[in-house]
C-alpha cells in the first residue's frame, strides 16, 4: 500500500486491529531481516505495545506493560528499544506530547506532519510533499538548512468535533 492509502486519516473505528498489529510486526521482521538488524523479542514486544491502540504511548506506559508481562525492564532498556525502532523507521516520536506512535508506512525515512487530537489522543500521520517543500523553501529563504522536519498539529478529530465516540 502507498502512503496515500494509509495516511491522511485517523484510524477507522471499526477495523481489524489484531491484523493491523500483525502486519506491523511482519513488516518490522522483514525490514530488519533485509537490513541485517536484530529484531529481538524485547524490540518486538515494544513495537507491539506502541501499535496496541493506535494512540500515542509514553515510554513509562511501555515500561509498566513490560513489567506487567513479568519482565524486569528498566527505563534505559525501553528507551534503547524505542531508539532502535525510530532508527529503523518503524516508530515516530511525538515531541509535543512525549509519546510514540507506529509508522503506517515503515522502512523509509520521511518527514511527516502529525494531527494529534487533544481529546481522544488519536493521531493521523501525513507526509505531504507540498508542506515539506514549503517549509524547506521558507527555511532556505532565511538561510537555514533544514536537516530534519516534523510538524505536530494539535486539535480535534472529526469524531470529537462532532461529539461522537470514536470507539
Image (cartoon, rainbow, N blue to C red):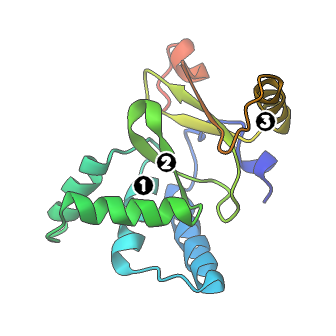
Quarter residue 82 falls in: bottom left
Residue under numbered circle 1:
50
In the depicted structure, whether residue 66 falls above or below residue 52: below
Q: Please report contact status of discs 2 and 1: CB closer than 8 Å, yes or no.
A: yes
Residue 88 rendering spot, x and y as whole percentages:
57, 67
Q: Which of marks 2 and 3 is nearer the N terminus?
A: 2
Q: Which residue is drawn at 37% across and 45% down?
A: 57
Secondary element at tag 1 = helix
In the depicted structure, whether residue 4 falls above or below residue 119: below
Residue under numbered circle 2:
101
Residue 7 rendering spot, x and y as whole percentages:
70, 43
Q: Which of marks 3 and 1 is nearer the N terminus?
A: 1
- Circle 1 packing at 10 Å, graded few (<14), some (14-19), many (20+), is many
Left or right of 103 in this view: 21 = left
Secondary element at tag 3 = helix
Quarter residue 156 falls in: top right
In the depicted structure, whether residue 64 falls above or below residue 45: above
Residue under numbered circle 3:
132
State the CA–CA distance, disc 2 to disc 1. Answer: 6 Å
Q: Which residue is drawn at 60% across and 40% down?
A: 12
Amino acid at each position: 500500500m502507498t502512503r496515500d492509502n494509509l495516511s491522511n486519516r485517523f484510524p477507522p473505528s471499526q477495523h481489524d486491529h489484531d491484523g493491523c498489529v500483525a502486519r506491523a510486526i511482519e513488516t518490522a521482521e522483514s525490514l530488519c531481516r533485509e537490513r541485517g538488524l536484530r529484531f529481538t523479542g524485547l524490540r518486538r514486544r515494544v513495537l507491539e505495545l506502541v501499535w496496541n491502540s493506535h494512540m500515542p504511548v509514553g515510554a513509562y506506559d511501555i515500561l509498566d506493560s513490560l513489567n506487567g508481562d513479568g519482565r524486569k525492564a528498566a527505563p534505559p532498556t525501553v528507551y534503547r528499544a524505542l531508539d532502535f525502532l525510530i532508527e529503523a523507521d518503524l516508530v515516530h516520536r511525538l515531541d509535543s506530547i512525549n509519546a510514540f506512535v507506529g509508522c503506517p508506512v515503515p522502512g523509509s525515512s520521511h518527514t511527516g506532519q502529525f494531527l494529534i487530537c487533544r481529546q481522544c489522543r488519536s493521531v493521523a500521520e501525513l507526509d505531504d510533499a507540498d508542506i515539506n517543500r514549503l517549509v524547506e523553501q521558507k527555511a532556505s529563504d532565511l538561510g537555514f538548512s533544514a536537516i530534519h522536519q516534523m510538524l505536530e498539529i494539535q486539535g480535534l478529530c472529526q469524531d470529537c468535533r462532532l461529539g461522537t465516540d470514536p470507539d
